[in-house]
């Protein structure tokens, strides 16, 4: 059966409400327009999402809007790592590394073990390189000690053993390999699950809703005017407090509050390349480029992820992209430790760039601290910027503590103290992914073929126990059990699920952030058209 034939036979599954999914956009706009919210979060990146999640847990009436898709910009353009920050040991930031490790372990073990994967890192030490073997050996030992040796003991490995695990590793002039452990994730999926957690806690969310202006009451910001980018509908939201969590656009929104507001941030671009792998990789490479910078080569989603760059960016955030100069730099730096055959441009399937939000000021962006800054504007709007993916829960708690300490207590005295909230509340779908994959394979439909092993593994590690809901859709409609593309593990049931339960509105929402079709280079015009057609049947 061809893809075209399959999709023509898929019936409309009705509206969101009829399918037992999320409210329609019209219903959500009505909800947002009729109530006065305690907190309006503008910005659906991970900072805004985490804050909305923690605020809803605290008993606040929370609304979250974004001009694009959830995690549609920087939050889905990271290096996909949950890590302690090995390079921070260079600057003596021992406490920061320990705190990062605590958050990393909490997310990967208690909060989202179904979405995070342990990853072994090899740090090659070459003759004439910026660091010696003894120094790096001591460094990875200290790094693992700060993680309470939860990922093993950092140590040195022989070049021959490392080459067995990473066949594409360059061994010329390779003196030793330092070994340490961190974790990896699909950042877009992690963000979406956190949106679900916020909604489960009571938040009302809407993507593709652009702020066109702020509402004021006696000089205070008390809401926002919005426009639905999909159908042009204009509406507004009233709120006792507004949080600006728009990332690279934070100063744009601050200028709506106060046209004279001085710039508060600077931006650094991080570019990445995704390539097909020429051999199995059992570990990632973290290769020192100079005293401060490391270039990564990460096995990720059955592909190889290379990056990243770190340069000042002064253009329009909407136009950030990977340039030829970026591509050359990434490939040249990767060539320090990777053989040429793995670095052929013909293997590149996708490239992406995100913008790090750094505190304003002089200095090299590569050495700048990834700290979170919360400021209050002239009209009482709070702005939050900066931080790392690894500490997204900590950032949410930090903002909530700031809200609770505001003069006059604008959110009231009944706000649940953040210290009383569950310390490690899991994200939806929490389960052992291996057990989920096993059940998906064993509990397939009686008639017809069983689920393919790669599809079962993919669903288990991207949805956790929610994968059973997708399997149920596929069992009820065999057409939905078909692959979206022959060379990817995803099935059409995921598109319906994304439409009805994950706020997917456009083909890019599905192909770039709810599945891996785009990063695999498989988002063909035919696939895009069929996905959009299925989205439009709601």
Image: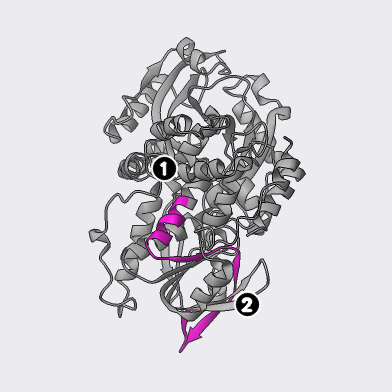
**Contact, mark 2 vs mark 1 (Cβ under 8 Å):** no
Residue ID for mark 1: 465
Q: Which residue sits at x=53%, y=70%?
A: 28
Mark 2 neighbour class, 10 Å CA radius: few under 14, some 14 to 19, many 20 or more: some
Q: Which residue sits at x=55%, y=50%?
A: 497
- Left or right, residue 161 beside residue 417: right
Give how far across and how far down residue 294 sits, in percent. 51, 34
Residue extending furthest toward the left: 420
Q: Nearer the viewer, residue 189 or 88?
A: 189
Q: Quadrant of residue 121?
A: top left
SS class, disc 2: strand
Mark 1 neighbour class, 10 Å CA radius: few under 14, some 14 to 19, many 20 or more: many
Q: Is 527 above or below relative to 317? A: above
Q: Is residue 209 magenta?
A: yes
Q: Nearer the viewer, residue 59 or 165?
A: 59
Any part of residue 432 in sight: yes
Q: Which residue sits at x=58%, y=78%?
A: 235
Q: Quadrant of the C terminus?
A: bottom right
Q: Which residue sits at x=30%, y=35%?
A: 147
SS class, disc 1: helix
User: Which stretch appears magenta?
Assistant: 193-222
Any part of residue 270 in sight: no
Q: Is 383 above or below relative to 156? A: below
Residue extending furthest toward the bottom: 218
């Amino acid at each position: 059966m061809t893809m075209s034939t399959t999709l023509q036979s898929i019936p409309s599954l009705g509206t969101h409400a009829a399918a037992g999914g999320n409210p329609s956009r019209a219903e959500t706009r009505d909800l947002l327009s009729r109530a006065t919210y305690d907190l309006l979060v503008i910005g659906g990146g991970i900072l805004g999402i985490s804050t909305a999640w923690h605020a809803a847990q605290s008993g606040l009436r929370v609304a979250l809007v974004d001009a694009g898709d959830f995690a549609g910009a920087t939050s889905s353009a990271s290096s996909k790592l949950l890590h302690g920050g090995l390079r921070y040991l260079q600057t003596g930031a021992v406490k920061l590394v320990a705190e990062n490790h605590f958050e990393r372990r909490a997310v990967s073990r208690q909060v989202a073990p179904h979405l995070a994967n342990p990853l072994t890192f090899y740090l090659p030490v070459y003759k004439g390189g910026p660091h010696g073997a003894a120094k790096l050996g001591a460094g990875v030992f200290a790094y693992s000690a700060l993680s309470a040796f939860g990922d093993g003991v950092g140590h040195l490995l022989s070049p021959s053993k490392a080459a067995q695990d990473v066949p594409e590793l360059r061994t010329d002039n390779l003196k030793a390999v330092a070994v340490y452990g961190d974790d990896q994730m699909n950042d877009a999926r992690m963000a979406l699950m956190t949106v679900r957690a916020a909604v489960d806690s009571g938040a009302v969310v809407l993507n593709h809703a652009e702020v066109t202006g702020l509402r004021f009451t006696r000089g205070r910001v008390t809401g926002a005017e919005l426009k639905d980018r999909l159908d042009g509908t204009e509406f507004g939201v009233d709120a006792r407090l507004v949080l600006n969590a728009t990332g690279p656009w934070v100063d744009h929104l601050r200028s709506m509050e106060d046209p004279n507001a001085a710039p508060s941030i600077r931006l650094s671009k991080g570019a990445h390349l995704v390539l097909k792998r020429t051999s199995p990789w059992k570990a990632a490479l973290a290769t020192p480029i100079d005293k401060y910078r490391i270039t990564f080569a990460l096995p990720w989603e059955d592909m190889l992820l290379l990056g990243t760059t770190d340069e000042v960016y002064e253009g329009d955030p909407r136009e950030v992209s990977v340039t030829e100069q970026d591509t050359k730099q990434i490939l040249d730096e990767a060539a320090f430790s990777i053989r040429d055959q793995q670095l052929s441009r013909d293997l590149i399937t996708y490239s992406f760039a995100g913008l790090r939000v750094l505190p304003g000021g002089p200095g090299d962006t590569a050495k700048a601290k990834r700290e979170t800054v919360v400021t209050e504007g002239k009209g009482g709007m709070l702005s939050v910027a900066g931080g790392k993916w690894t500490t997204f829960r900590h950032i949410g708690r930090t903002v909530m503590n700031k809200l609770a300490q505001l003069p006059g207590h604008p959110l009231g005295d009944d706000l649940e103290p953040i210290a009383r909230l569950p310390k490690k509340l899991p994200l939806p779908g929490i389960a052992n992914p291996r057990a989920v994959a096993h059940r998906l394979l064993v509990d397939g439909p009686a008639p017809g073929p069983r689920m393919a092993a790669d599809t079962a593994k993919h669903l288990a590690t991207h949805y956790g126990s929610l994968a059973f809901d997708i399997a149920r859709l596929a069992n009820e409609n065999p057409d939905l059990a078909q692959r979206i593309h022959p060379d990817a593990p995803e099935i059409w049931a995921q598109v319906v699920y994304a439409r009805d339960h994950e706020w997917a509105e456009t083909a890019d929402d599905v192909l770039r952030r709810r599945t891996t079709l785009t990063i695999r280079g498989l988002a063909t015009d035919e696939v895009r058209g069929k996905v959009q057609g299925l989205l439009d049947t709601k």
